[in-house]
Amino acid sequence: MFWTLFIGVGALFGAAMMWIAPAKLGMAPLLDQMQANLPLADVFFTSFAWPGVFLLVIIGLPNLAGAALVARQHRIAPIWTTACGVVLIAWICLQLFVAFGPNPVSDVYLAFGLAQAVMGILWIRRARRDATIQPH
């Protein structure tokens, strides 16, 4: 539950900051890097509007949905949580290797994605093990 909520709420606030006050937060250099390094820059990266939408839709909403699945103890919650971790890892790899290069924030979120994916995998393994144990 922690990772899905933490990452989901963080992405929600990150997207909101991209829409509300990117200049005040010193984000302009990031936009310059996106425009220089990402495809379709002239369409999607002329402001922080689309990056905010992408962050919310790709990272934020799936993690918040994952938190709801965990809270309801839904059977797909472990798989969903693992998938959210893998998507975050891919997102951060895109940032690290294509858009921005190494930076402390991306490094930390890469660790968060790895932790979320590993915890999800361990949860899946435990659930499978528990399903095979039959009471006598």
Image (cartoon, helix red, strand yellow):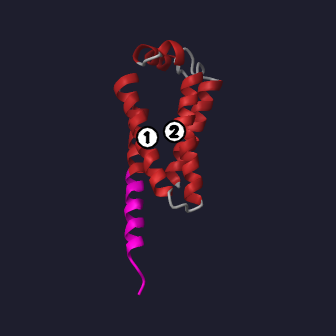
Q: Residue at x 43, y 18 (%)?
A: 39
Q: Which mark is residue 76?
A: none
Tell me where residue 121 appears, x and y as whole percent. Answer: 38, 56
Please state which of residues 85 and 18 is positioned toward the viewer in this rendering.
Answer: 85
Q: Residue at x 50, y 56 (%)?
A: 77
What quarter of the picture does the C terminus occupy?
bottom left
Task: Specify the quadrant of the image occupied by residue 24.
Answer: top right
Q: Residues within 10 Å of mark 2 (few under 14, many from 20)?
A: many
- Asked if 63 appears above or below 79 in the picture, the reply is above
Helix, strand or loop status at disc 1: helix
Per the rendered image, the range of residues in magenta is 118-136
Q: Residues within 10 Å of mark 1 (few under 14, many from 20)?
A: some
Label 1 to label 2: alpha-carbon separation: 7 Å
Tell me where residue 13 appears, x and y as whole percent. Answer: 60, 36
Please state which of residues 33 and 122 is positioned toward the viewer in this rendering.
Answer: 122
Q: Residue furthest right?
A: 20
The magenta stretch spans residue 122: yes
The magenta stretch spans residue 11: no
Mark 2 or mark 1, which is nearer the start of the sequence?
2
Q: Residue furthest bottom?
A: 136
Q: Which mark is residue 59?
A: 2
Q: How many marks?
A: 2
Q: Residue at x 40, y 23 (%)?
A: 99
Q: Looking at numbered disc 2 in the image, what kind of residue is underneath it?
A: Ile
Q: Residue at x 37, y 62 (%)?
A: 125
User: Badges 1 and 2: C-beta atoms under 8 Å apart?
Assistant: yes
Task: Specify the quadrant of the image occupied by residue 133.
Answer: bottom left
Tell me where residue 130 appears, x and y as whole percent. Answer: 41, 72
- Residue holding disc 1: 87
Q: Main secondary structure of the magenta part?
A: helix
Q: Is residue 9 visible?
A: yes
